[in-house]
Each structure stands twice: as structure tokens, then as C-alpha cells.
Image: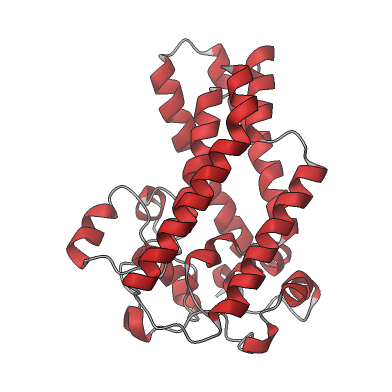
Amino acid sequence: MNIWAITHEAFIRLSFFLGILALMALWEFLAPRRILTTSKATRWMSNLGIAFLDTLIVRWLLPMGAVSLAILVHEQGWGLLSRLDIPYGLAIGASVIGLDLVVYLQHVMFHAIPILWRLHRVHHTDLDFDVTTGIRFHPLEIILSMGIKLGVISVLGPPIVAVLAFEVLLNATALFNHSNIRIPSKLDRVLRFFVVTPDMHRIHHSVLAGETNRNFGFNLPWWDLLLGTYRHQPADGHEGMVIGLPEFRDAHRLTLPWMLALPFMGKPGKYALSH
């Protein structure tokens, strides 16, 4: 299992990423939810470019990824779950759910702390909302996120397959729930019991601060419902709502160099949880 996970992890994750990216892009073309307001070519080039840069930097600075660390933790017998005598399937389920809760709490933290919001607002300055918005993150945020994830894996001691499954799920759902796709409203209401849908997460990208600090979940929708951060619909409707941040409305500043410089420019602004 250990050798298989090490050998095939990158291939499995890349295959799921490219496959879901292509599927969502096709769905967006055939059944878009909203009309895009800015150049799709410019946005895609910038968003895909920063995602590629994120991957290179993380691989260079943190060569031991989540799955590799999970293997080491398993071999050394570290972590809480490795010391508990619980069924393997239960350990996998608890690990995936626990890691997802950490991602939710981390997301809230990146909104609540001004210096972290400086990094995270790169994700929110996209003036449209489609599948590539789900991979638009500043490299420093990705490094911090990976550090948090590695710390949790060390303490939790999850099964190796749970970490691999969570990595695939997180990437897949981030592409899905940021997609500009039309899902029938009745089906969307059912899906929201199990996964964050695009209509649910799009509200989080509203220009209105009262909506930006809602619907933090990336994968499971339960945390927003349980912890009081859920909003069902945007005030102006999905077609009428404005995407982005009020202080960054210049479509010409959607380029990769500008995104990299954004955390170091100006004041933190009206980050969501302070208002």
C-alpha cells in the first residue's frame, strides 16, 4: 500500500484534476449559470498560471506532501488514530471528515485575520466565477495551508488512503463548486445535504461583505449549517449578484504579476469577518 501510494499519488491527483477541469469547462460551455463579464482568456491564463506556480513552489519548499507524511506517520505509529483500536473504515471516514472541518476553520481564519486576508483576497478578486476560480490562490496561502494540513496529519495519524482520498476530493469539489454551471434548483437543494454546490458557494464570492462571510465550506456543507455561517441565496439573485471585492474592480489588473503583488498593496480593506 505504501509503495503504491507513493508511486501513483501524483498520477491519480493529476488525472482527477484534469478530468474534472475538462468536464466542468464543457458543462460551463453547454449550460452556463451566468454571463461572464470579463475576458475569459485573460482570466484562465492568469488563474491556471498561478495554480501551476503554486504547484512548483510547494513541491520545492515542501517536498514531503500530505500522502508522503501520512506514510511516515503510519510507519512510525504517530498520531491519535494510530493509537486507537477502531475499525479501519471508521478511521478513514473520521479522517476525511476531520480534515474537511480543518479546511473550513482555516478558511474562516483567513477571512478573520487581516494579514491572512491579504493573501486570501487574491482568490476573491476574480471578477467572474468559473472553474478556474477554484485554483486561484496566492502561493503564500498555499504554503500556509499545506503547513496546517501537515500538522493536522501528524497529530491525527489518519490512514494513508484517507489522506489520498481527501486530497482528491478537495481538488475535485473546489473545481465543481466554483464552476459556472446550471443545476436544476430541485436537484441543487438535494445536493446541498451532501456537498457544497456552485450556487451555494457562489454567494461566498459576492461583493457584499454580509454574503462574503457566509458559506465557507469547500467540500462538506455541514459546517456552515452547524456553525451558523450558512446563507441559502444571495440578496440580488445569482444572475444579478456582483462577484469580487469593491476595492478591486479594474479588469486590467487580473494578470499573474498583479495577483502575486496584491497581498503587499494597500490596506487589508473590509475583510469579511470584521464587518
User: Could you say which quadrant of the image residue 152 lies in?
Assistant: top right
- Can residue 80 be seen here? yes
User: Could you say which quadrant of the image residue 180 lies in?
Assistant: bottom left
Task: In the rendered view, tell whether residue 150 sits above or below residue 172.
Answer: above
**Residue 14 at x, y = what percent?**
57, 44
Residue ID at (58%, 27%): 156
Q: Where does the C terminus fall, quadrant-wise?
A: bottom right
Q: Is residue 107 left or right of residue 122?
A: left
Q: Residue furthest top?
A: 85
Task: In the rendered view, tell whether residue 199 sits above or below residue 216.
Answer: below
Q: Is residue 41 left or right of residue 32?
A: right
User: Could you say which quadrant of the image residue 97 lies in?
Assistant: top left
Residue ID at (30%, 67%): 232
Q: Residue furthest left?
A: 186
Q: Is residue 146 left or right of residue 157?
A: right
Q: Nearer the viewer, residue 263 or 10?
A: 10
| Total number of numbered discs in the rendering | 0
**Residue 242 at x, y = what percent?**
45, 84
Q: Nearer the viewer, residue 166 or 9?
A: 9
**Residue 49 at x, y = what percent?**
68, 65
Residue ID at (62%, 30%): 67
Picture colour scheme: secondary structure
- Can residue 235 be seen here? no
Q: Where does the N terminus fall, quadrant-wise?
A: top right
**Residue 239 at x, y = what percent?**
34, 83
